[in-house]
Image (spheres, rainbow, N blue to C red):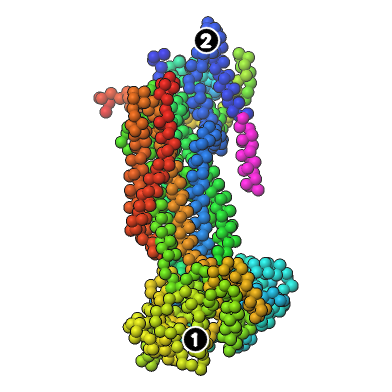
Amino acid sequence: MRVLNSLGSLWERLFHRSTKNAEMEEELRSHIEHRADDLERSGLDRTEAERRARVEFGGYERYRQESHEAVGGQFFETVLADIRFSLRMLRKSPGFTIAAVLTLALAIGANAVVFAVLNALILRPIHAPEPQSLYAIQRGSDEAINHSYPDYRDLRDRNRSFDGLTAYNLASVGLDTGNNPTPAWIYEVTANYFDALKINPYLGRFFHASDEHGANSAPYIVLSYAYWQSRFQSDRGVVGRVVQLNKHPFTILGVAPPEFRGTLSFIFPDFWAPMVNQEQIEGSTVLNERGHRELLMVLGHLKAGVTPAQAIADLNSVGSYLEKTYPKEDGNMTFSLARPGLAGDWFGRPLRAFLVGLMMLAGLILLAACANLGSLFAARAADRGREVALRLALGASRRRILRGLFTEAILISLAGGTVGLAGSVALLRWLSAWRPLSSSPLQVAVNPDAKVYLVALLLALASGFLFGAVPVRQVLRTDPYQVVKSGSSVRMGQRMTVRDLLLVVQIAICAVLVTSSMVAVRGLMRSLESNFGFEPQNAMLLQTTLTMAGYMGERVPAMQRRMIDAVETIPGVKSVGSVDRPPLHYGANIANVFIDRTTDLKPANAAAQAAMYRISPEYFDAAGTAFLSGRALNWHDDKNAPRVAVVNRQFANKIFGSVPRAIGGYYKSGDGSRIQVVGIVEDGKYGTLTEDLQPAMFLSLLQSPSPVTSLVVRSHRDPGQLAAAIKSKVRELDQGLPVDIQTWNRELEGALFASRMATISLGVMGVMGAVLAITGIFGMAAYSVSKRLRELGIRIALGAQRKQVLEAALGRALRLLAFGSAAGLVLGVLASRVLAYIVYQATPRDPLVLACVVLAMLLLGLLATWIPAQRALSVNPLILLRDE
Amino acid sequence: MGDQAQLLPGTLDLLILRAVSLGPLHGYGILLRIGQISGNALLIEQGALYPGLFRLVRQGLLKANWGTSENNRRAKFYELTAAGRRRLREETDSWNRLATAIGTALAVQPEEI
């Protein structure tokens, strides 16, 4: 109500303003006429009397304005008047206005997007009640967040600091609601998951700890809101329905609230299922194996009043109990706490560093844009020196003039902010809906919230004040009499003006941006060229998990062999091999290996941790991995034969000392079985692109079976046709097996995703920097040419050569450009060291990169000065000298 | 003209109040009245009167109504409000005290100390 009232009175004031003004004018006029009447009576004629009366009255405008202020309550009016005046001024120079608004829109848009991503991934906690007391438990000095189920149970039951601990795991399953098996991503959770997180159902009910009664006792699922909408069309009748999950009946219990999308910020499950049913869901269960740390995360709320430090001490005492009780499986059981959203610190820390770095670059862009606009504003204020001087001479206060200038700056910054925000909101909407990788549920909800809008508004206002403040000193120093007398306030040939300094700063910033983006792009190119230890070209990948169609035990390798044999019959297929999980597929399976002499197989005694792959005999052929020596695996290396493995060169060197000594040698796996090395293959990349050389071992899928299956199909045929042919072959074998077929290159996008995203974002920053450099140099060059057209005309008339004219017109701009670029290049090289942490093989001390940056800045300079140079050269001295 | 005195800051308001206290006046009339009662000894730029007038109206010391002047022109007539009358009394007292003090101070002869 109060708001309405004050709005009403504001309206009234605005409405009555014109009558009030008119009254004031009338009163002042009445005064002058009365005086004129008196003067007329003293003998002057009427015209002369009125003139005298006006002179005697004094500065009419000044007193009118002072009266205005004396009446008071004019704040809104003066602001409105300033805004109207500024709009008129801006309309008079549309080119300037559009350029300024677009520059700012770009800069503020970039900041809003980066901030929104930062906000979504780092600042915003996951959507659960009381997020500030929610922590995930990390183990050991390498801050691993994975734990084994028995360890989890001990932690849950023995700690005194948490209000319930829950755990979950990611799994890919086939969901069949009636003859339509489709893959879905789920969280396998402990049954107390929703209770521990304090989430209430949107529909139906959740499962609880009391629903767990041993293996496969809780065949229930809870749908996510989004999946309920997309897969079940928001049908409220789904509660109680029975669906087939990997061929096992599960009952839908309920639907989670829309805002709760799981406990990771970037992987949203389609639904949740109890972990006690792991055997049905994944085909095998590791819930009883303390050495298998396959839980993705253990998390819970701290009890009220318990500090994180107290909780860590409590957990560590449980840890030392575990080390003592289970020396074989548990070593290094010290704990730390982390926020759950980013899957702990090992992943969260580099991501955070990268996003903060990106935010700083975006800030630099805004700074460069402000420098750009600041120099434009200063130039504009200089051009308007005469107007300002006249207004000062006529009695306007300097404060009023400055307020006008600031109003202009703020108007531009608000317009730029609005346009930029609108653009970034569109981009963010698209990003939120984007599923970048077809083979994983990676997704980020970066929808802008109030914080993003607020930050954009604040940035817009701050930058408005920043670049609006540049011409202040200029205005304050204006001497009206000097300007009115001599006609112009432009002084040429000063040593270094604020404008020059701003231009150098701006170019330096832009050079930093260009350098970093080039370093990143170059790093990505190298990482694409590096040797993966396999050949993703001309290879298709068929991925499935056989448990989705109910295969268990002995039937798993048998089915894998049938699939290989079937796909091999497709014309044009050169070779087919099977591997449980292809290299670079979101990390690798890591296992402890021991030298043959070791008898006490506890983790601390492991000789190495090696990437482990379970392959069919033809895998190396199909994958294009080079064989170095020894023999390959064959179909006779089965359950009844001695256990054998092929290892990579690094494994041979690390465990056996050299390749020749490795052939025929034995090592031990964590379960104590002796394995003989029969062959050696080249090294490759297994977990990430940036890893150092890693030991790897390749076991026979007959000797250590896994239902996770990736067929590598090498062929020169068209991928589309080949995929269709493979699909129909697999259909012939089993109708109900959901499969995912794509080229290996496509599948690798996941491995390259991080550095590719980093490169794209840095590339965009670089392009923005380049654009800002162009507009900045262009503005400066165009301005200096336009100011000196007369001088240039005289020079040409006196016989100056093209070179001399160009030197006079643009020499200064180019010198500033060179100076700024050099400074920026040095800073960029320093900044790029930070990049080396994120972008694989990014090194700033790369002559090619440095050459590219220099070349780019040169080209930018040429491009930006081209039009002003043409204008300077085409000056017609006759026309110019005739004017004025 | 040459022997006119500059106004001390703040005294214009007091003069306006005094001029209006002798009867309702329009702006130009106030100026004439000030000239008349001060013996034309004060230099006031005519326009400078108006910001002062508006300020006094806003402070509630004067009230204004449109009327017709002796020249048969529309003009705004000012008169004192009760608050204005009170203010004039206070200001006059304090001015007198100030003037007496300064006058005494300036009139002191060396032998009187």
Establish whether labels 1 and 2 are both on one chain: yes
A376 up-or-down from A181: above or below = above
Checking the image for residue A634, the label placed there is 1
Residue A791 percent coordinates (x, y): 37, 26
Question: In the drawing, does residue A10 fall left or right of residue A507?
Answer: right
Quadrant containing the C terminus of chain A is top left
- Residue A302 in view of the camera: no
- Per the image, is A16 magenta? yes
A682 up-or-down from B74: above or below = below
**Start-end of magenta stretch:** A1-18
Which SS does the magenta portion mostly show?
A: helix
Residue A695 percent coordinates (x, y): 40, 79
Checking the image for residue A48, the label placed there is 2
Residue A266 percent coordinates (x, y): 54, 67
Checking the image for residue A847, the label placed there is none
Q: Amino acid at mark 2?
A: Glu
Q: Nearer the viewer, residue A251 or B20?
A: A251
User: Residue placed farthest to the front in the image?
Assistant: A571
The residue drawn where x is 43% and y is 84% is A631
Task: State yes or no: discs 1 and 2 in contact (Cβ < 8 Å).
Answer: no
Q: Residues within 10 Å of mark 2 (few under 14, many from 20)?
A: few
Helix, strand or loop status at disc 2: helix
User: Residue placed farthest to the top in the image?
Assistant: A43
- Per the image, is A868 magenta? no
Q: Chain of mark 2?
A: A
Q: Nearer the viewer, residue A63 or A282?
A: A282
The residue drawn where x is 46% and y is 28% is A387
Q: Nearer the viewer, residue A716 or A361?
A: A716
Question: In the drawing, does residue A478 fall left or right of residue A74?
Answer: left
User: Residue placed farthest to the right in the image?
Assistant: A237
Q: What is the CA distance from the residue labelled 1 to the residue labelled 2?
A: 120 Å
